[in-house]
């Protein structure tokens, strides 16, 4: 039948709201095969999460605890972006990634009763199945039943609407966040495994990025695709071998390298300038790596670049040597800063003595290193940050803590206080360290830190065309 032969004309000025069309609702509710979706967490996650809850329960007896998973960020008016659970929620559930979920722990005489509240799936036959674009299964795919989650996790799982409204309102609990941060500082064996896997995937991602250097740099007969190509290469690697990047991937070539968080990545990759790569894979359990290397795309640093890299390397080694049980968190910061200040003084860049620069009233060397020298690492890249910075620095390091050490030197192209040959050079070295009973284990030591090693690694993993 052609349009002109239609006997019942289209009615109205707008398409009907499907959920209000009884015949449609009735027809959409039937004729679907049952799908049983098995919930997945990484191996060992339910057991690790149970232990995390036990430790939290012990730390805050008698307190009612409400930990929401949060919501996906919305952008472009009404478009939900990828969902990632809040970090405390991930730590307490082993990484249950269900938007809107809420974990409730109610005190009993002996501990806490735990219930995980989840939004029940909008299955065929429920009104949201086709009408709820945010979570209807027709829109976002099928999800596990609450019973399946209960079996996997070993805790009571109930629908979200059964949560006590008074509890649902108690979402923002600074004291609870602080206690979770304190407890999250020492990682257990399962967490260390997650971090090792994230670091290994990150090291592989560095190699994937190096392999794309010729494409990013370009050559006489083809333009280079620039920083963004390398950023995309690493981000694709993260999405394929983990969950996503643990933070916005930083790829800074030449004059962009001194910009600490150069996530714009819209410049070219210059063959003869250091290229700063700060990149971390967040694994499927949401633990992330955070690693930086500064590489020469041509395969060789020039003498000035090399001099900067060598000083950063010395500071890095001094910082890493200061990571051991019994040391204070701030020790590796001061150890690295002393090397940096001394080196800058030797180069004639400091207008004051090293002692004056290192004093709390000085800090002149920090012009070229305004950020910290490291941080805890875990489910968050800057982990345990509900413990204030001042209190973090006073913490005594213990086996099981995982930290980054990340000194750098950042000479901006616009910095008129340094000789022209230093302007536009930025170098950072960043490794992830596990504090062990005997000192520290550098989880990211598959990547070299000495200039020659970095040069060789770059040449081996790329095929420079220049
Ligand atoms: N990439 C963020 C940091 O190094 O802390
Ligand atoms: Mn870091
Ligand atoms: Mn970093």
Image (cartoon, rainbow, N blue to C red):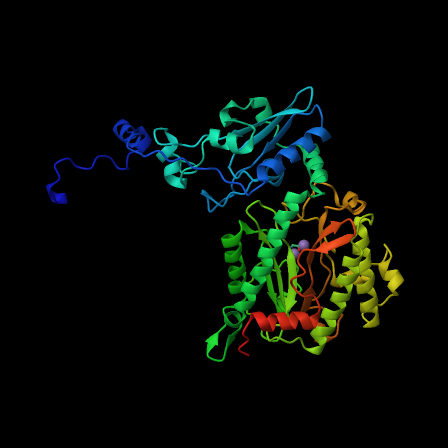
Q: Residue 371: x and y, percent?
A: 72, 56
For this view, does 454 lie left or right of residue 70?
Answer: right
The picture places residue 262, in percent across and down from the top left corner, at: 61, 60
Q: Position of residue 248 (x, y in %)?
A: 58, 54
> At which x and y percent is residue 401?
72, 47
Q: From what the image shows, is residue 66 above or below residue 196?
A: above
Q: Residue at x 49, y 25 (%)?
A: 161
On the picture, is 402 further left or further right than 92? Answer: right
How many numbered marks appear? 0
Above or below 224: residue 75:
above
Taking 329 as reference, is 176 left or right? left
Nearest the eye: 171 or 321 = 321
Q: Nearer the viewer, residue 429 or 229?
A: 429
Q: Quadrant of the N terminus?
A: top left
- Relative to 425, is 4 above or below? above
State ligand 2's quadrant.
Answer: bottom right
Nearer to the camera, 85 or 378: 378
Placement of the C terminus among the 4 image quadrants: bottom right
Residue 291 is at least partly visible in this image: yes
Residue drawn at 74 percent across, 58 percent down: 370
Q: Is residue 412 visible?
A: no
Residue at 71% across, 78% down: 303
Is 457 displayed left or right of 186 in the figure? left
Q: Is residue 186 above or below residue 207?
A: above
* Residue found farthest to the top: 109
């Amino acid at each position: 039948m052609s349009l002109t032969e239609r006997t019942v004309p289209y009615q109205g000025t707008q398409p009907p709201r499907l959920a209000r069309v009884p015949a449609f609702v009735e027809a959409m509710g039937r004729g679907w095969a049952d799908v049983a979706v098995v919930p997945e967490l990484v191996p060992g996650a339910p057991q690790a999460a149970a232990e995390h809850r036990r430790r939290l329960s012990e730390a805050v007896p008698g307190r009612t605890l409400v930990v929401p998973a949060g919501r996906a960020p919305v952008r472009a008016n009404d478009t939900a972006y990828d969902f990632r659970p809040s970090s405390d929620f991930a730590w307490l559930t082993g990484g249950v990634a269900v938007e809107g979920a809420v974990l409730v722990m109610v005190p009993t005489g002996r501990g806490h009763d735990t219930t995980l509240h989840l939004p029940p799936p909008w299955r065929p036959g429920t009104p949201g199945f086709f009408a709820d674009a945010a979570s209807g299964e027709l829109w976002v795919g099928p999800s596990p039943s609450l019973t399946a989650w209960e079996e996997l996790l070993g805790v009571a799982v109930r629908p979200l609407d059964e949560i006590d409204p008074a509890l649902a309102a108690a979402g923002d609990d600074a004291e609870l966040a602080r206690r979770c941060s304190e407890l999250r500082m020492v990682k257990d064996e399962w967490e260390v495994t997650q971090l090792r896997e994230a670091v290994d995937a990150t090291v592989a991602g560095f190699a994937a990025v190096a392999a794309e250097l010729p494409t990013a740099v370009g050559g006489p007969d083809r333009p280079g695709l620039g920083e963004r190509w390398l950023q995309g290469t690493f981000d694709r690697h993260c999405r394929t071998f983990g969950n996503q990047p643990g933070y916005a991937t930083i790829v800074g070539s030449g004059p962009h390298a001194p910009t600490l968080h150069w996530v714009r990545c819209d410049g070219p990759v210059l063959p003869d300038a250091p290229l700063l790569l700060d990149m971390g894979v967040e694994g499927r359990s949401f633990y992330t790596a955070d690693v930086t290397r500064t590489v020469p795309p041509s395969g060789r640093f020039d003498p000035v670049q090399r001099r900067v890299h060598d000083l950063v390397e010395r500071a890095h080694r001094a910082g890493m040597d200061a990571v051991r049980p019994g040391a204070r968190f701030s020790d590796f910061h001061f150890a690295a800063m002393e090397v940096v200040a001394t080196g800058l003084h030797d180069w004639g860049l400091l207008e004051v003595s090293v002692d004056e620069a290192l004093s709390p009233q000085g800090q002149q060397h920090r012009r070229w290193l305004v950020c910290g020298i490291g941080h805890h690492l875990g489910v968050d890249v800057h982990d345990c940050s509900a413990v204030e910075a001042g209190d973090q620095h006073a913490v005594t390091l213990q086996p099981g803590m995982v930290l980054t050490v990340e000194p750098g030197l950042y000479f901006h192209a616009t910095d008129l206080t340094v000789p022209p040959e230093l302007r536009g050079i930025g170098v950072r070295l960043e490794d992830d360290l596990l504090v062990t009973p005997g000192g520290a284990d550098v989880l990211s030591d598959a990547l070299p830190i000495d200039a020659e090693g970095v040069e060789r690694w770059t040449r081996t993993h790329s095929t420079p065309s220049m």
